[in-house]
Every structure is written in C-alpha cells, then in structure tokens.
Image (cartoon, rainbow, N blue to C red):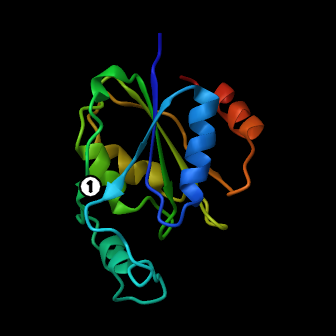
C-alpha cells in the first residue's frame, strides 16, 4: 500500500492552503518545509535585486537551511513537493529539502502556486537534487482557489 507525504514551502500562506487540500485528497501526511532563518517581507521583495530571495535565486548553488526534518521519510512511497514559483522555478530551499533525503525508489510529484507564472524549467532544475532512480511525475501549477475536486482529478490522472 502506498503512503503519501505532502511536503511544502509556503512564503505567504497560499501554497500551505493548497498543500492542506492536497493532503486531504491523497489522505497523506503533511510536512511544512520551514527555513532555519524565516523570510521577512523585505527578503521576499522580488523587485529588489538585493533582497534575500533575489540573491538566492541568482545563485543556483544556494541551499537555504531548513529547520526540522521529516522523522520517518523511509515510510513514504509518494512525496508531493509544493512551493511558490520564484523566477519560473522552485525556490532553492526545495533543492535543500530534496538533497536532505534519499528518494531512491520513491515517486516525487511537484506542485506549485503562482499568480500567473507556469512551472517553467522547474522539473529539470529539481531532478539533479535526487538520486537517478527517483521516479518523477510532471508537476502542475495551481491557483490559490483550486478546489479539492480539481486536485483529485489531477492526482487521478497521474501515472503513479
């Protein structure tokens, strides 16, 4: 039997709401990816090229530290990983999360929130952070108002 985890990073609460709905749909556990150093609103000002998020996203090797760990990652077969889209990809803290665990033999399914940006090159940016025998499913961007029915339709259409 498959056991699912919905892990997410949410800067403003939007991704958190989608993750909570998704966890209900997949009857999975939920885990918040929390930065060791929380982001302030100034850190998240994408219009300021010197803001923390702007600097992190310019540096592809940036790996913001995470507070806490998933205690029982080995129990999960399927891991949904949620995040807001930053600069058309996942924030680098998602790479930190993926590089913190062994995803060998697991299925990883990214999902994102954004006001309008698509997933961009997200999947290709995330894959190197996991072992080569990690199964990936194509991710999807959702609006903040996504319904549980829409999430259920998406999950049912995945090749897990």
Q: Is residue 147 left or right of residue 28?
A: right
Q: Nearer the viewer, residue 88 or 26?
A: 26
Residue at 24% in and 37% down: 101
x, y percent for residue 44:
44, 77
Classify mark 1: helix, strand or loop.
strand
Q: Is residue 17 left or right of residue 124?
A: right
User: Which residue reaches farthest top?
Assistant: 1
Residue at 54% in and 39% down: 138
The residue indicated by pointer 1 is 66
In the depicted structure, whether residue 130 falls above or below residue 143: above
Count of residue discs: 1
x, y percent for residue 115:
65, 67
Residue at 26% in and 34% down: 131
x, y percent for residue 61:
23, 64
Tell me if I can see residue 158 in this picture.
no
Circle 1 crowding by C-alpha within 10 Å: few under 14, some 14–19, many from 20: some
Residue at 46% in and 83% down: 45
Query: For residue 65, what is the image quadrant?
Result: bottom left
In the depicted structure, whether residue 71 falls above or below residue 146: above
Query: For residue 64, what is the image quadrant?
Result: bottom left
């Amino acid at each position: 039997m498959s056991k699912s985890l919905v892990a997410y990073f949410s800067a403003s609460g939007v991704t958190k709401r989608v993750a909570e709905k998704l966890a209900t749909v997949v009857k999975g556990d939920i885990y918040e990816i929390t930065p060791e150093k929380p982001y302030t609103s100034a850190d998240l000002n994408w219009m300021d090229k010197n803001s923390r998020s702007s600097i992190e996203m310019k540096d592809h090797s940036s790996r913001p530290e995470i507070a806490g760990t998933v205690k029982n990652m080995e129990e999960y077969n399927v891991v949904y990983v949620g995040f807001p889209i930053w600069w058309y990809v996942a924030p680098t803290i998602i790479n930190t999360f993926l590089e913190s665990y062994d995803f060998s033999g697991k299925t990883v399914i990214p999902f994102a929130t954004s006001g309008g940006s698509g997933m961009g090159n997200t999947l290709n940016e995330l894959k190197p952070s996991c072992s080569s025998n990690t199964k990936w499913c194509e991710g999807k961007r959702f609006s903040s108002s996504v319904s549980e029915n829409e999430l259920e339709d998406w999950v049912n259409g995945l090749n897990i």
